[in-house]
Amino acid sequence: MSNDPNTSLVIMGVAGCGKSSLGVALAQRLAFELIEGDDHHSAGNRQKMQQGTPLTDADRAGWLATLAGLLAQRHGRDVVLTCSALRRAYREQLRAAAPGLRFVFLDITPEQARQRVATRSSHFFNTALVDSQFATLESPVGEAGVLRVDAAEPLPQLLEQVAAWAHSAPTSPTQEAA
């Protein structure tokens, strides 16, 4: 992949879907720069999430603006961003900063997400917030430039699916991994 602006990817989904694990593996595999979205939350947002208080659109506004700015600064470079991108408006904000941006939607059930979040001892996200993430989620299925994958699949299988898709030409309809 060269400096084609369409090479930037967002690994998205609710908490516990595996964004960071897939993002790190994919960035290494493709030799892309990794931007870990969680690293850019404000201290106030982190505190709210630790306490089990769901973030509002207003809470997320600064975080999304920061991520959009980081994408814009790197436009034309190969980037993997991990970001929940729960609402369509959030995804549109990121797309506006990096035209041609594509999304990998790690689809997971609420039960699986709760279980995964409960096992993460070093993360600031409170398990009580999983349901609020699903309530906020506006599925990207049907949006252009989106690959839906099953987050329950093993990481090596997800990595293969997403790497192959990342090397393919962008398409209009949402794609679903086989």
Image: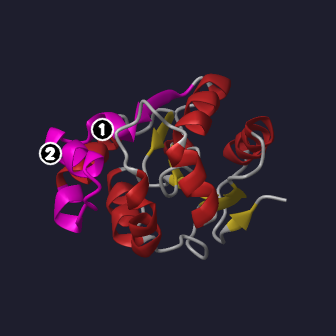
Three-letter amino acid code at the position of disc 1: Leu
For marks 2 and 1, the one nearer the N-term is: 2
Query: Relative to 81, is 139 above or below?
Result: below
Disc 1 element: helix
**Residue 162: assigned label:** none
In the shown orientation, is residue 21 left or right of residue 72? Answer: right
Residue at horizontal 27 percent and vertical 37 percent from the top: 40
Depth check, front residue: 47 or 41: 47
**Residue 42: x %, y % from top left:** 18, 41
**Residue 44: assigned label:** 2
Q: Is residue 6 in view? A: no
**Residue 134: x %, y % from top left:** 47, 69
Query: Relative to 58, is 102 above or below?
Result: above
Is residue 13 one of those drawn in magenta? no
First to last magenta residue range? 32-61
Pair 2/1: label in front = 2
Residue at horizontal 42 percent and vertical 64 percent from the top: 133
Disc 2 element: helix
In the shown orientation, is residue 132 left or right of residue 5? Answer: left
Q: Which residue is mark 1?
A: 70
Is residue 42 one of those drawn in magenta? yes
Q: What separation in Å lies between label 2 and label 1 (alpha carbons)?
A: 20 Å
Query: Relative to 133, is 44 above or below?
Result: above
Within 10 angstroms of label 2, few (less than 14), some, or many (20 or more) residues?
few
Q: Point out the image quarter for the N terminus.
A: top right
Within 10 angstroms of label 1, few (less than 14), some, or many (20 or more) residues?
some
Depth check, front residue: 125 or 42: 125
Q: Point out the image quarter for the C terminus.
A: bottom right
**Residue 19: x %, y % from top left:** 54, 44
Residue 145, image quadrant: bottom right
